């Protein structure tokens, strides 16, 4: 168990609307958890090893609530179509390659190395339908020191023959095999049930997945209300559902008795919002992806005001990169265009709000994560912004904001996950 | 006069819709101008010094058609308001500091160093109202090896007393002084007449500036139709003008007999488009700035189809950074949200289109610039994308696209401006 003290400028989200900044403060880690932020180090902690990060900023680690590891290979490529065409043209052919473990090892090693160097400490990751490659990805994630949920994808319809699982039975059998192998195997890496989205999974598969979910007590992740064509298709596929979210709900895969993440929710209406609130569903807001695939912009401020749980996501490779800083600035920018072009009843997001989404908002999916409250798991990222030159004095708050807009991996100076120093 | 040959993968824009890629080709520079792209080096050029860039990409230098050097200090900061409040709160107080030459030297040196390291080879830059600081910036730009137009700003109304020029006479006198000092002084750096925008300049100042423009034969840059409140204000200030563009036109500062850049044009209507076409006005599309200040999205595809001259701009610090790659990806993303949220009659921009805007589109303001056509000035940037790892083979075209999405200054391997190697 790790016990130590860090010193620096401590920046964290207090709530949805407020950043809290404590300059030259001490941040105490006891048994891998936060034990407070102090202007003067209490006597009882003075024997602990201390690292003084000087003028650097210390922020909570960020949670990327939704991204696709096998799509990392084509990040920044081919974003000239909408969702359904993009899946068939870019995504499915690439994901097929993960039947080959050698390819998967090369590709996933690159993905994990980037994620490890980033501001992300926790992530919820889609793999592919392939069990061996998914287990390999989980092994690599465990070795990285990051904390994650990783999902073997289920898809037994509306996918190319070369990629789709050949039957419900095969999909369920493989998923059971994978859950038996991986549930409880690692300290930091856990399985998460991952039906790709309604169009990819037959009704009987969805019901069987709900049984597996309960049997293994795992959470669920999927996609919801991202694109108009997709939503219309779901309406055809599950005509008895009142909306897309209700389709997941009917199958027993929409939270309530389990933790559940739904990515996007760009076009969720009030009834879908109500279902999400009732069931405690986490929304993974993926602003860059929703721009790149011309999906639209989710009304995040409205979701927050309605009491929904919202985190932030890169959605690689709908989003072009693994940087949560870029996700934060894209979230602000997209919300401003939504306000200007579509709906002035929903205010744009502020910097404080997107910092909340990236830390506390998504961190809550992992429990007490995403802040330095006493008892919270000790995830911290130390930022060095000294290469971002400026002629005028800047406050710590200003330095944090510009690091989000201008920073990259060169600004990630040190990183701690659940009390363990990664670098 | 420089004569040499480069070898590598030559990527350039052929026209508004098409990239042209020539792998492992020779690019010849004769007397600082392009002399063709060849699969096999013609015998007559075999005596020239040759640099083999191997597997790297060689693209035309990019033109940033609109950015504010004194705002570089607060890039990535304070973008939580619309244009007019943002000017009063962030911009004007910062610009005031450039009365102090020591501050200007520190700030402008940082700005110029970043621009020199970037993919930009040519730029049209706003300075401040201060003559000495503007001349200093021009001196620094000249030393950088980049080619630029730099403008001392005119503003004699609707600005804080501490920043506004005290009278029309003072503004004209200072501008004349500055033009006398700088016109023809440098090889790469030229003055450009820069009335900030209509709200900043009285009618009599505008008429006097038009006289100065003709006397010194300099081009003009300003802002046009960026924000709804600004447009309404211009309507009040120049009630006889048929629209914002017509106001400039009435004053003789809207192209026609001179080169002219208007930044933004987010809300230009058909009549304003027609005035721009008739007068050959260049539009500086500033997509990130137009998101950050919640201005909206200019219909660039419509402008191109209408035959307007369009280039791309970072608009630092409405835009957060000097990277034209980021401006390109923001342009695509903004156009997709415009298409999705506002108007499906204007198609989103493709990668080929934004590459055109960043090279040929804006380069045309400088003459034969922005491509490797024979006779064009030799501006070239060599990209090394080897740090952007990937498991699969990628075409040169794909490598170019992902470098625009993922690259930064680390990917700028070498740079030539008008035949001179900068690094």
Image (cartoon, coloured by chain):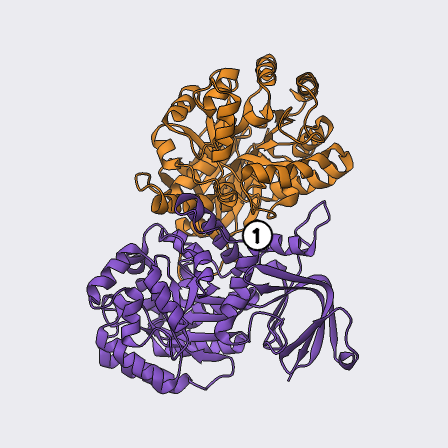
Chain colours: A orange, B purple
Query: Foreground: A302 or A361?
Result: A302
Q: Quarter-wise, where is residue A15 in the image?
A: top left
Drawn side of residue A17 relative to residue A96, left or right: left
Element carrying mark 1: helix
Q: Position of residue A366 (x, y in %)?
A: 52, 27
Q: Position of residue B155 (x, y in %)?
A: 28, 71
Q: Position of residue B315 (x, y in %)?
A: 42, 62
Q: Position of residue A192 (x, y in %)?
A: 59, 24
Query: Foreground: A88 or A289?
Result: A88
Q: Quarter-wise, where is residue B116 in the image?
A: bottom right
Drawn side of residue B12 relative to residue B366, left or right: right
Quadrant the C terminus of chain B occupies? bottom right
Residue visible at 20% across and 66% down in the picture: B239
Label 1 marks a residue whose chain is: B
Quadrant the N terminus of chain B occupies? bottom right
Residue visible at 61% across and 52% down in the picture: B402
Residue visible at 70% across and 53% down in the picture: B395
Drawn side of residue A385 relative to residue B45, left or right: left
**According to the image, label 1 marks what residue?**
B405
């Amino acid at each position: 168990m790790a016990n130590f003290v860090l010193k620096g400028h401590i920046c964290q989200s207090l709530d949805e609307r407020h950043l809290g900044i404590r300059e030259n403060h001490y941040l105490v880690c006891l048994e891998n958890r936060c034990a407070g932020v102090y202007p003067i180090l209490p006597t009882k902690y003075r024997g602990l090893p201390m690292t003084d990060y000087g003028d650097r900023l210390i922020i909570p680690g960020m949670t990327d609530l939704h991204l696709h590891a096998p799509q990392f290979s084509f990040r920044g490529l081919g974003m000239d179509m909408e969702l359904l065409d993009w899946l068939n043209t870019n995504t499915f052919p690439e994901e097929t390659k993960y039947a080959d473990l050698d390819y998967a090892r090369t590709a996933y090693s690159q993905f994990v190395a980037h994620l490890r160097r980033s501001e992300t400490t926790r992530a919820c990751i889609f793999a592919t339908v392939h069990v061996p490659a998914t287990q390999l990805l989980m092994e690599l994630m465990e070795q990285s020191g990051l904390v994650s949920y990783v999902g073997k994808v289920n898809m037994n319809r509306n996918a190319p023959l070369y990629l789709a699982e050949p039957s419900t039975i095969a999909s369920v059998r493989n998923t059971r095999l994978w859950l038996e192998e991986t549930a409880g195997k690692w300290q930091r890496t856990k399985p998460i049930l991952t039906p790709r989205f309604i169009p990819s999974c037959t009704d009987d598969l969805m019901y069987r997945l709900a049984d597996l979910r309960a049997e293994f007590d795992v959470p669920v992740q999927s996609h919801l209300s991202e694109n108009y064509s997709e939503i219309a298709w779901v309406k055809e596929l599950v005509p008895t559902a009142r909306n897309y979210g209700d389709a997941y709900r009917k199958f027993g895969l929409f939270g309530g008795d389990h933790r559940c993440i739904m990515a996007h929710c760009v076009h969720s209406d009030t009834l879908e919002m109500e279902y999400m609130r009732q069931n405690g569903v986490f929304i993974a807001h993926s602003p860059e992806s929703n721009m790149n695939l011309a999906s639209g912009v989710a009304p995040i401020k409205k979701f927050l005001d309605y009491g929904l749980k919202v985190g932030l996501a890169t959605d690689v490779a709908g989003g072009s990169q693994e940087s949560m800083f870029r996700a934060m600035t894209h979230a602000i920018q997209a919300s401003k265009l939504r306000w200007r072009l579509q709906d002035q009843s929903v205010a744009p997001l502020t910097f404080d709000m997107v910092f909340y989404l990236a830390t506390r908002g998504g961190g809550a999916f992992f429990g007490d994560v995403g802040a330095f409250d006493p008892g919270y798991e000790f995830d911290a990222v130390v930022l060095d912004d000294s290469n971002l030159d400026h002629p005028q004095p800047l406050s710590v708050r200003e330095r944090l904001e510009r690091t989000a807009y201008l920073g990259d991996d060169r600004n990630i100076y040190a990183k701690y996950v659940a009390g363990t120093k990664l670098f």
